[in-house]
Image (cartoon, rainbow, N blue to C red):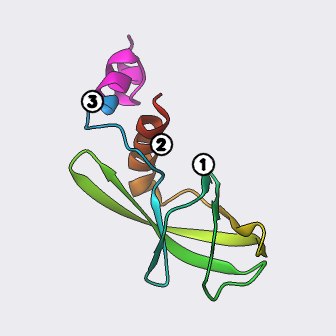
Amino acid sequence: MSWLSKLSGGGKAANGAAADKGPRPSQPPTIVIDHHEFVPAEFAIGSFRLRPYDGDLIAHQQFDFKMVFTLGEEVVEAPCHGLVVKLTDESGLVARYKSPPSVYERKFLDYVRAWKGL
């Protein structure tokens, strides 16, 4: 393995080390909007669905929120920015979001890999 791939976290050893940071998460990260915590009904990198949603957001509104997850022993609260794509009683709140700031992005990707079992 080259030194560049070691620095960038590539290779099987680096990926295995990330997976050994603790038990596999059983649920997606918690979404905190205006001090209200929600566990998404659906979650993917770049989007999530909250169902049911009972808050003050409206369709096409931009909003700030925190994505809270545990990586090993560390509780991470990553600030994010989202956009409400759809908001109805049937669909709940569907939102797209930008990646967390770079200081949190690596931790977030490690969490998603552990949660998905990758």
Q: Residue furthest left?
A: 73
User: Label 3: which residue?
Assistant: 20
Query: Which amino acid, by three-letter code, is at mark 1?
Result: Ile
Around disc 1, counting alpha carbons within 10 Å, would you say few (fewer than 14), some (14 to 19), or many (20 or more)?
few
Mark sitting on residue 45: 1
How far is mark 3 from mark 1, CA to CA? Answer: 22 Å
Q: Which mark is residue 112?
A: 2
Mark 3 closeness class: few <14, some 14–19, many ≥20 residues within 10 Å = few
In the picture, the disc for residue 73 is: none
| In this view, 9 is above or below 89 | above
Element on which disc 1 rests? loop
Q: CA distance from mark 3 to mark 2?
A: 14 Å
| Quadrant in which residue 103 is drawn | bottom left
Residues 50 and 105: in front is 50
> Please, what is the three-letter code of the amino acid marked with disc 3?
Asp
Drawn side of residue 49 relative to residue 101, left or right: right
Callout 2 amino acid: Val
**Of the image marks 2 and 1, the number of the one nearer the N terminus:** 1
- The correct choice, above or below, for 70 with respect to 64 in the image is above
Question: Where is residue 60 shown, x and y percent of the image?
Answer: 78, 78
The residue drawn where x is 27% and y is 30% is 20
Residue found 42% across the figure and 23% down from its top? 10
- C-alpha gap between disc 2 and disc 1: 8 Å
Q: Cβ–Cβ below 8 Å for labels 2 and 1?
A: yes
Residue range in magenta is 1-17
Looking at this view, is 37 or 98 the one in front?
A: 37
Crowding around mark 2 (Cα neighbors within 10 Å: few <14, some 14 to 19, many 20+) is many
- Residue 39 lies within the magenta run: no
